[in-house]
Amino acid sequence: MRRKPIKLKRVYDRPDPEDGLRVLVDGLWPRGMSRHAASADLWLKEAAPSSALRRWYGHDPRRWNAFRQRYRAELEGRPAILDLLDDLRRRSPLTLLFGARDEARNNAVVLREMLDKPGASR
């Protein structure tokens, strides 16, 4: 089966039928968001950065490159999570949901980079 492209979307944005499988990849449930409103098919907390890394990063753009490197290292230690997400994207369109305001610098961006990197087919 071919791997389908992975979309990224803020959990606060309206769900779309083209989202396919919607997977929340944050370790904390988004503030003010009900389970129904999130329309997440799966909450994969294990794919989120560690609490220590999340707190250290604090969405400070100056720490983005270091955060990416540290989070990638964490993900490399969790091959089962990457394998699961890769398998899901082979079965259905996949949208990774995140709560961060910064759509260009968040954990879902790094996660998609890891899943899309050449040679990442598992």
Image (cartoon, rainbow, N blue to C red):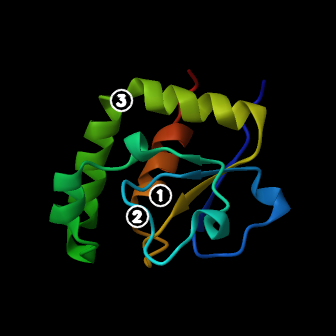
Q: Could you tell me how far apart the alpha carbons at marks 3 and 2 are, in whole angstroms?
A: 18 Å
Q: Judge the density around disc 3: few (<14), some (14-19), many (≥20) Cα neighbours within 10 Å.
A: few
- Numbered mark located on residue 106 in the image: 2
Q: Position of residue 95 (x, y in %)?
A: 65, 54
Contact between marks 1 and 2 (CB within 8 A): the answer is yes
Q: Position of residue 28 (x, y in %)?
A: 37, 60
Q: Position of residue 69 (x, y in %)?
A: 26, 48
Contact between marks 3 and 1 (CB within 8 A): the answer is no
Q: Residue at x 76, y 46 (%)?
A: 93
Amino acid type at image mark 2:
Asn
Q: Could you tell me how far apart the alpha carbons at marks 3 and 1 are, in whole angstroms?
A: 17 Å
Q: Earlier in the sequence, mark 3 or mark 2?
A: 3
Q: Residue at x 68, y 37 (%)?
A: 89
Amino acid type at image mark 3:
Arg
- Numbered mark located on residue 78 in the image: 3
Q: Residue at x 45, y 69 (%)?
A: 30
